[in-house]
Image (cartoon, grey):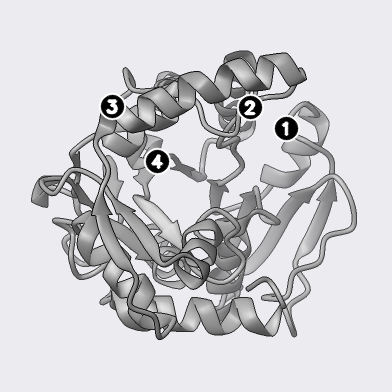
C-alpha cells in the first residue's frame, strides 16, 4: 500500500516545520510549498518534495495539491497592517482551498484568536480565513485552532524567556485570566492525528490543561525553568493601553511600525483563552510535554542555538 501524501503550506514557519516532521515520522510522504530552497533544523534525515512558489501562484498551488490525500494550510501572517493580514490570511486561504482536489481533505491551521474576531485585525483575519474555506469546501474543510504555541524555533515566546532571564521584576496581568498553551511538537502530533482519523468540523488543540494557565503560573514556571525567582508585580490593563498609545506616537514620529498594537493589547488582556470541552478532539494523542518540561526543553534548544 502506497504512503499517503500530505501537502503543506507554511512549512518553513515555526509550527509548519514541526508539522512536516510529524507527518514524515508518521509514515506520510510530504510535499511543501516554498518560495526558495527550504531548510530546517528539524528536518534532519527528511527530504520533503518542494514545489517552488507562493500563495499568489495558482499554478504552484495546483501542483502542490495534485494527488494529495490531505492539504494542510499552515501559512499565515501573525502581525502587520490589516490589508496585509487580509491578503495572506483570507485571500491566501481562499486560493489554497480553491486548489484542493475533490478527493482531498483540507486542514486549515487557524488560531484560537479566531474565536474572538472583534479583538484585533489578526483575529478578524483568521476568522475570515476560516469562513472563506468553509464557503468553498463545506464539510471537507477542517478548522484547526491552536492556542498559544511555544517550543524550539519560536521567536515570539523567546521574548518572554529573555525577559524572565534578565529582569528582576516580571509583570502579571489580570489574575482571573486563563491562557491555554501547547508545545509545538504536541500541536503537530495532534494535527497529524486529525488528518489520519478523518475528524470533521472545528477542533481546538491543547495540552493537558485545556482550561489554561494564569499569568502568575506562567511567569513563575518560565522563571523556574531558567533557575530564577524574580518579583512578580501586577500590571493593570490600563498601563498596557497607555504604553501602546505612547509607543504609537513615538513610532509615527520615527516613521516606524509600533512594536505592539491596540489589537495585540486587547488579545493579551482578554480573560478567556481557555479551551472548552466542546472544542477539543476527544481522541487527541496525549501531550508529551507539560508546561515546565516544555519550557525546559525549549530553553535548552534556544541555548544550543545561541538565541538565549
**Contact between labelled residues 4 and 3, with CB atoms less than 8 Å apart:** no
- Quadrant of the image occupied by residue 23: bottom right
Q: Is mark 1 on a helix, strand or loop?
A: loop
What distance separates the C-alpha of mark 4 from that of mark 2? Answer: 14 Å
Q: Residue at x 63, y 81 (%)?
A: 303
* Residue 113 visible: yes
Q: Which percent across, then down, holds residue 134?
A: 39, 25
Question: Which one is earlier in the sequence, the residue at label 3 or at label 4?
Answer: 4
- Of badges 2 and 1, nearer the viewer stands 2
Q: Please give the residue where the numbered disc 3 appears in the rendered image.
A: 238
Say which residue label 1 marks. Answer: 55
The answer to which of marks 3 and 2 sits earlier in the sequence is 2
Give the percent coordinates (x, y) of residue 46: 73, 78
- Determine the CA span between mark 1 and mark 3: 39 Å
Pointer 2 residue: 88
Which residue appears at 61% of the width and 61% of the height?
5
> For this view, does 37 lie left or right of residue 72?
right
Identify the residue position indicated by label 4 in the image: 111
Amino acid at each position: 500500500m502506497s504512503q499517503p501524501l500530505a501537502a503543506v503550506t507554511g512549512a518553513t514557519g515555526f509550527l509548519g516545520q514541526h508539522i512536516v516532521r510529524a507527518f514524515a515520522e508518521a509514515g506520510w510522504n510530504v510535499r511543501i510549498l516554498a518560495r526558495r530552497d527550504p531548510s530546517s533544523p528539524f528536518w534532519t534525515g527528511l527530504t520533503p518534495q518542494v514545489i517552488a512558489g507562493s500563495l499568489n501562484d495558482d499554478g504552484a498551488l495546483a501542483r502542490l495539491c495534485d494527488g494529495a490525500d490531505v492539504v494542510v494550510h499552515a501559512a499565515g501572517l501573525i502581525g502587520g497592517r490589516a490589508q496585509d493580514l487580509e491578503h495572506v490570511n483570507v485571500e491566501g486561504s481562499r486560493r489554497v482551498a480553491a486548489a484542493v482536489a475533490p478527493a482531498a481533505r483540507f486542514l486549515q491551521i487557524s488560531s484560537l484568536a479566531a474565536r474572538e474576531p472583534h479583538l484585533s485585525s489578526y483575529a478578524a483575519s483568521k476568522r475570515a480565513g476560516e469562513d472563506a474555506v468553509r464557503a468553498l469546501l463545506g464539510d471537507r474543510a477542517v478548522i484547526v485552532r491552536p492556542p498559544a504555541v511555544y517550543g524550539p524555533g519560536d521567536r515570539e515566546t523567546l521574548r518572554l524567556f529573555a525577559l524572565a532571564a534578565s529582569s528582576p521584576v516580571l509583570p502579571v496581568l489580570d489574575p482571573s485570566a486563563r491562557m491555554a498553551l501547547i508545545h509545538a511538537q504536541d500541536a503537530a502530533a495532534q494535527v497529524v492525528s486529525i488528518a489520519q482519523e478523518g475528524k470533521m468540523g472545528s477542533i481546538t488543540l491543547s495540552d493537558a490543561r485545556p482550561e489554561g494557565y494564569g499569568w502568575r503560573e506562567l511567569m513563575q514556571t518560565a522563571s523556574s525553568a531558567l533557575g530564577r525567582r524574580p518579583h512578580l508585580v501586577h500590571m493593570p490593563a490600563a498601563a498596557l493601553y497607555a504604553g501602546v498609545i505612547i509607543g504609537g506616537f513615538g513610532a509615527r514620529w520615527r516613521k516606524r511600525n509600533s512594536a505592539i498594537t491596540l489589537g495585540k493589547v486587547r488579545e493579551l488582556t482578554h480573560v478567556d483563552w481557555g479551551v472548552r470541552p466542546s472544542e477539543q478532539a476527544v481522541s487527541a494523542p496525549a501531550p508529551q510535554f507539560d508546561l515546565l518540561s516544555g519550557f525546559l526543553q525549549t530553553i535548552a534548544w534556544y541555548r544550543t542555538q545561541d538565541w538565549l
